[in-house]
Image (cartoon, grey):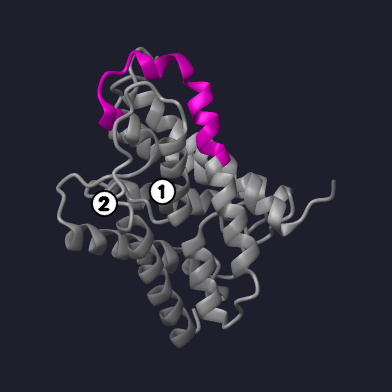
C-alpha cells in the first residue's frame, strides 16, 4: 500500500488519540501505574501525542499533518482552497474513532475496577469543569483560535525556514501551553475529531458501568473549535500570516 494524504491523516490522528486519550486513561482509571498523577501529566502527554501524531502523519503521506478538522477548516478559509476538507476530515474522524477503540482495548481490565462513569467518559471526550454552555463554547473558541494563530506563527515565512524536524516539536509546545493555560475550563478539545469520534466510540463500546455519553454537551467541542478555526483562518488571510 502506498502512502497518501488520506492515510497520513488517518494514521496520524489514530496515534494522536491513542497517546492523548491514553494518558487520560492512565491518570483517571483505577489501578494503573499513573492513577491520580494529575493535570500536568495529562497536558504533557497530550503535547507529546500531538508531536508524535504529526511525525507519523507526515511519514504516512500527509505533509500538512492537520490531524484536526478545525485546522483543516482554518487553512481552507485562509487559502480559499477547500479541496482537502472532505478527505482530510473523513480520515481524521475515522482515525480518532479507531484510536479511541485502541485505548479501550489497551486499558481493558481497568474499566471494570473504575466505579465512576464520569471518569470513564473523560477518557474518551471532554467535559466542562463548570457547565455553562455559552462560557464553555467561548473557551473552546478562544483556545482553538490560539491554536490556529500559533500554527500560523510557527509556519510564518517572517521567521525564516525552520530546520527539518523542528516543526512538530513546536506544535507540541503550543498544545502544551494551551493545555496548561486554557485547558482547565473544558479540557481543551479544540477538535471535533478529538471529541466527537471518541464519544461515539464510548457510546458503542461495551464498557462496564459507563453511563451516559453526555450528548447534551457534545455540540460545544464541535461548534466552538470550528468557529474559532474559521475566525483564525480569516485573520490569517487578512494579515497574510
Q: Residue at x 59, y 46 (%)?
A: 95
Depth check, front residue: 159 or 235: 235
Q: Residue at x 26, y 51 (%)?
A: 216
Q: Residue at x 51, y 57 (%)?
A: 68
Residue 146 visible in this rendered orientation of the protein: no
Disc 1 or disc 2, which is closer to the eye?
2
What secondary structure is found at the residue carrying circle 1?
helix
What secondary structure is found at the residue carrying circle 2?
loop
Label for residue 216?
Answer: 2
**Which tag, 1 or 2, sits closer to the chain's start?**
1
Residue 34 versus residue 231 in the image, above or below: above
Specify whether residue 126 is painted magenta.
no
Residue 18 versus residue 85 in the image, above or below: above
Depth check, front residue: 164 or 34: 34
Residue to which mark 1 is pinned: 195
Answer with the quarter of the image where residue 40 lies: top left
Q: Which residues are magenta?
A: 98-119
* Residue 18: percent from left, percent from top: 53, 35
Q: Residue at x 57, y 83 (%)?
A: 80
The CA distance from mark 1 to mark 2 is: 13 Å
Residue 62 versus residue 227 in the image, above or below: above
Q: Which residue is farthest bottom?
A: 238
Q: Is residue 183 left or right of residue 64?
A: left
Q: Residues within 10 Å of mark 1 (few under 14, many from 20)?
A: many
Residue 240 versus residue 177 in the image, above or below: below
Q: Is residue 212 left or right of residue 77?
A: left
Label for residue 146?
Answer: none
Q: Are marks 1 and 2 in contact (CB under 8 Å)?
A: no
The majority secondary structure of the magenta stretch comes to helix
Depth check, front residue: 227 or 232: 227
Residue 30 visible in this rendered orientation of the protein: yes
Q: How many marks?
A: 2
Amino acid at each position: 500500500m502506498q502512502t497518501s494524504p488520506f492515510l497520513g491523516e488517518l494514521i496520524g490522528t489514530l496515534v494522536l488519540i491513542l497517546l492523548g486519550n491514553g494518558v487520560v486513561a492512565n491518570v483517571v482509571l483505577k489501578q494503573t501505574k499513573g492513577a491520580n498523577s494529575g493535570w500536568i501529566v495529562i497536558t504533557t502527554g497530550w503535547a507529546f501525542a500531538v508531536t508524535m501524531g504529526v511525525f507519523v502523519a507526515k511519514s504516512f503521506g500527509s505533509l500538512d499533518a492537520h490531524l484536526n478538522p478545525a485546522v483543516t477548516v482554518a487553512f481552507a478559509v485562509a487559502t480559499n482552497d477547500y479541496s482537502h476538507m472532505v478527505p482530510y476530515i473523513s480520515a481524521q474522524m475515522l482515525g480518532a474513532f479507531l484510536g479511541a477503540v485502541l485505548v479501550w482495548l489497551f486499558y481493558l481490565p481497568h474499566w471494570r475496577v473504575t466505579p465512576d462513569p464520569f471518569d470513564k467518559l473523560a477518557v474518551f471526550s471532554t467535559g466542562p469543569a463548570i457547565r455553562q454552555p455559552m462560557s464553555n463554547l467561548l473557551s473552546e473558541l478562544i483556545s482553538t483560535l490560539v491554536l490556529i494563530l500559533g500554527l500560523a506563527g510557527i509556519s510564518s515565512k517572517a521567521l525564516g525556514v525552520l530546520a527539518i524536524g523542528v516543526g512538530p516539536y513546536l506544535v507540541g509546545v503550543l498544545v502544551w501551553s494551551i493545555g496548561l493555560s486554557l485547558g482547565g475550563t473544558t479540557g481543551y478539545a479544540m477538535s471535533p475529531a478529538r471529541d466527537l469520534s471518541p464519544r461515539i466510540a464510548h457510546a458503542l463500546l461495551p464498557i462496564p458501568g459507563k453511563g451516559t455519553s453526555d450528548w447534551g454537551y457534545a455540540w460545544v467541542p464541535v461548534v466552538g473549535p470550528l468557529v474559532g478555526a474559521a475566525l483564525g483562518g480569516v485573520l490569517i488571510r487578512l494579515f497574510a500570516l
